[in-house]
Image (cartoon, rainbow, N blue to C red):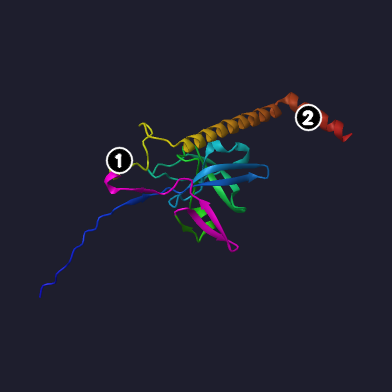
Amino acid sequence: MATKHNNYLTQAKKYKIQKWHVEIDIRISQDYNLIVNALVDTGADLNCIREALVPTQYLEKTTESLFGANRQQLEIQYKLANAKVCNEGVCYTTDFVMVKTLSQNVILGLPFLHLISPFKVTNDGIVTEYLNKEILFPFIYPLIVRDPNTLKNDCIHCDHSKNTFVPIDKYIANLNIKQQQLSYLKDDLDFERQKIRLQDKKMQEKILNFKNHIER
């Protein structure tokens, strides 16, 4: 007796696009912090920060390695240890590697996700719990619902060589980040200049003479 198989074909009426962009406060020291938009990425093995965002005096050398989505090894020389990712008065201590060619300013990867686990994802953001208190990391950009017929025209990883529309709030945020980068680079330059001055023999003699004068 032949068996009949009923085959069904369903058609998707809509699809959703959502990148997990959240605003976080990264506290690097008691008097220094960085408020920045971060991409939460479940496929990232490490937490990453674009290298120019943090002055070098807060960094330390590292031998850690990381590969990008294209399987190319990323250039990593420094890491930021024991940084605190804070939201709604709760801080999670974790490390970051500094990446020169990072496509995002900050990527929160698996080390951060392990800290906030278990968590759930809603249309509003990422929700976790700490001491019976619900903590929400709200998404910066809303959920986008599209018609499948427009799929070929949609772009998740946009080609910046083309004239693509950039929302004004994202443009302003990127402009603020660039201004921060210039400020950090200026701080780094001043810091390196001071190091060079301290290595000068005349400066060392002045410091030694001043020290001897104080100790008398």
The C terminus is located in which quarter? top right
SS for dot 1: helix
Q: Residue at x 19, y 63 (%)?
A: 7
130 in magenta: yes
In the rendered image, residue 102 lying in the magenta stretch gets the answer no
- The answer to which quarter of the image holds residue 159 is top left
Q: Residue furthest left?
A: 1
Q: Quadrant of residue 3?
A: bottom left
User: Element type at marker 2?
Assistant: helix
In the rendered image, residue 24, in percent from the top left (x then y), is placed at 55, 47
Q: Amino acid at mark 2?
A: Ile
**Which residue ends up furthest to the bottom in the rendered image?**
1
Q: Residue at label 1?
A: 153
Q: Nearer the N terminus, badge 1 or badge 2?
A: 1
Q: Quadrant of residue 59?
A: top right
What residue appears at the point 53 percent right and 57 percent down from the top-left corner?
Answer: 116
Give the residue type that dot 1 points to. Asn
Decide if residue 60 is in sight here: no
Q: Position of residue 149 (x, y in %)?
A: 26, 46
Residues at marks 1 and 2, CA–CA distance in whole angstroms: 66 Å
Q: Which residues are magenta?
A: 123-150
Left or right position of 84 against 211: left
User: Which numbered disc covers residue 207?
Assistant: 2
Q: Is residue 111 above or below residue 35?
A: below
In this rendered view, identify the residue nearer to me: 99 or 163.
Answer: 163
Residue count near mark 2 (Cα–Cα under 10 Å), binned few <14, some 14–19, many ≥20: few
Query: Quick check: can you spot residue 166?
Result: yes
Q: Position of residue 23 (x, y in %)?
A: 53, 46
Closest to the observer, 85 or 58: 85
Number of numbered discs: 2
The quarter of the rendered structure image containing the N terminus is bottom left
Above or below: residue 12 compared with residue 186: below
